[in-house]
């Protein structure tokens, strides 16, 4: 039922995107106003002003202004080339053909293609009148100014999309948190079922949200003539790149599942040993960890400070306004079954190294999902990831080819997670002080 309602909602959203009712109204009103003004001014070919208005109304303010500027520049190029063509070939269809052979490549070369159709129509007026007198040139110029001017004025009003973008941001981040938790579940989060379904459906839904978000962010950026709102577009680009990383992690999880199935078919238990994951991890003691105050922590992925307070969203002056950094220490795993901060054990003699590493990375996946939000500079998460890598380096060497291949895929997942976090860190580093104050501290 939820999927069906989601599909209906997506269908309605797609219909709204295909039918831009505001643009339809602007086109209809603009054509009427332009033709009426041209007739009132006594201009010849008054209906051409309406056509120019129709072609000038674009989806954004900046695009409309760019189109108008290109048409004005190309108008003078068209006048010169048409005058040359008619001087040589007279006011004949051959002159019009020669004009287009010259005018079209010039416009394409210099990025003035938007002026080809509009100015060809205006030049055809000279061909019909068989003359290019100053008053006729002025008539065509006024038609162009009137038509484009009405288009600009009507496009000065554009609805703000900031609230819609903020709503999409919240939905995108919630979807990403869900995906990271699902991936942790598939890999074997302590206390969770390791047989979760593939994330393909959620990845596709996230992709659709990001496409909508990037479209809205681009239009919002193009509709602000003075304010700099490129932040939203860069944010959506960041999340789209991170989506590619999540897709690669999903592929790695699929390969692990295939390797587990192959080992299960042979009746052997290594290296994809699953009974050491989940809630019953036997002697490893995975799934329950004590904090400094002796309180039990059950795989929530949340860290506590010495006073028992959650340290999510804490900010560090060292990293600038709105930036956070975790300062908790890392509990090292020994040669036995010591627990680390993610509720996973070190590789002891009676514990499968593949199972321990799987649970360790799954714990970090879950931890990352809990900490993912727009205002996190991921410094603390990168430090946590380094501690996981250090623990993996202390584990025993693989005992055979199959275990080596399995652990290689696990390490690839960890590498992809590092890339996921480095993308966010680079995004934060590129934020200006004005961006931080406007979009982070001022949010």
Image (tube, grey):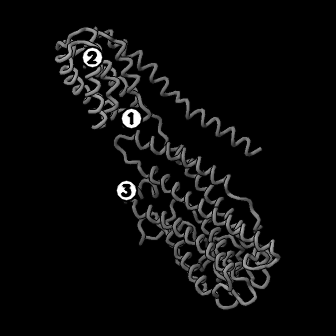
- Looking at the image, which residue is at 65% across and 36% down? 11
Whether tag 1 and tag 3 are in contact, CB under 8 A, the answer is no
Quadrant of res 99: top left
Q: How many marks?
A: 3
Residue 54, percent across and down?
41, 22
- Looking at the image, which residue is at 80% across and 72% down? 264
Quadrant of res 148: top left
- Closer to the chain start, of discs 1 and 3, is 1
Which is closer to the viewer, label 2 or label 3? 2
- Looking at the image, which residue is at 36% across and 37% down? 62
Residue 257, percent across and down?
72, 67
Whether tag 2 and tag 3 are in contact, CB under 8 A, the answer is no
- Closer to the chain start, of discs 2 and 1, is 1
> What's the mark number on residue 94?
2
Tell me the quarter of the image containing the N terminus.
top right
Residue 253, percent across and down?
67, 66
Q: Disc 3 designates what residue?
A: 434
Name above or below for residue 4 compared with residue 381: above
Element carrying mark 1: helix
Element carrying mark 2: helix
- Closer to the chain start, of discs 2 and 3, is 2
> What's the mark number on residue 61?
1
Q: Which of these two is toward me, 124 or 347?
A: 124
Q: Residues within 10 Å of mark 3 (few under 14, many from 20)?
A: few
Q: Residues within 10 Å of mark 2 (few under 14, many from 20)?
A: some
| Mark 1 vs mark 3, CA separation in Å | 24 Å
Q: Is residue 253 left or right of residue 76?
A: right
Q: Which of these two is toward me, 78 or 215?
A: 78
Q: Residue furthest right?
A: 267
């Amino acid at each position: 039922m939820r999927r069906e309602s989601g599909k209906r909602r997506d269908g309605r959203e797609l219909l709204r995107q295909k039918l831009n009712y505001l643009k339809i109204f602007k086109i209809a009103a603009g054509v009427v106003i332009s033709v009426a003004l041209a007739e009132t001014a006594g201009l010849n070919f008054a209906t051409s002003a309406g056509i120019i208005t129709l072609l000038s109304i674009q989806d954004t303010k900046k695009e409309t202004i760019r189109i108008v500027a290109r048409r004005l520049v190309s108008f003078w190029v068209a006048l010169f080339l048409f005058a040359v063509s008619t001087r040589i070939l007279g006011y004949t269809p051959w002159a019009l053909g020669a004009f287009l052979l010259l005018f079209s490549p010039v416009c394409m070369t210099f990025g003035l293609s938007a002026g080809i159709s509009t100015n060809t129509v205006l030049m055809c007026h000279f061909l019909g009148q068989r003359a290019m007198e100053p008053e006729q040139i002025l008539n065509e110029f006024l038609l162009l100014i009137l038509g484009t001017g009405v288009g600009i004025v009507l496009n000065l009003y554009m609805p703000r999309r900031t609230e819609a973008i903020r709503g999409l941001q919240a939905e995108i981040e919630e979807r990403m948190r869900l995906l990271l938790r699902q991936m942790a579940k598939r890999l074997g989060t302590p206390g969770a079922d390791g047989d979760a379904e593939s994330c393909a459906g959620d990845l596709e839904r996230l992709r659709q949200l990001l496409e909508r978000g990037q479209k809205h962010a681009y239009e919002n950026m193009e509709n602000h003539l003075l304010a700099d709102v490129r932040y939203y577009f860069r944010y959506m680009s960041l999340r789209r790149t991170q989506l590619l990383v999540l897709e690669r992690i999903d592929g790695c999880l699929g390969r692990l599942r295939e390797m587990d199935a192959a080992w299960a078919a042979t009746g052997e238990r290594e290296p994809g040993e699953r009974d050491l994951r989940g809630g019953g991890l036997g002697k490893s003691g995975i799934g329950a960890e004590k904090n400094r105050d002796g309180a039990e922590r059950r795989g929530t992925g949340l860290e506590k400070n010495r006073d028992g307070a959650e340290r999510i969203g804490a900010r560090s002056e060292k990293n600038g306004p709105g930036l956070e950094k975790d300062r908790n220490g890392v509990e090292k795993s020994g040669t036995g079954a010591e627990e680390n901060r993610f509720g996973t054990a070190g590789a002891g003699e009676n514990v499968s190294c593949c199972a321990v590493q799987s649970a360790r990375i799954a714990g970090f996946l879950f931890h990352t999902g809990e900490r993912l939000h727009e205002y996190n500079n991921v410094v603390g998460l990168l430090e946590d990831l380094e501690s996981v890598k250090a623990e993996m380096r202390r584990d025993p060497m693989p005992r055979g080819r199959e275990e080596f291949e399995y652990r290689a895929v696990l390490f690839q997942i960890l590498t992809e997670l590092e890339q996921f976090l480095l993308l966010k860190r680079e995004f934060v580093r590129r934020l200006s002080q004005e961006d931080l104050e406007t979009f982070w501290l001022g949010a």
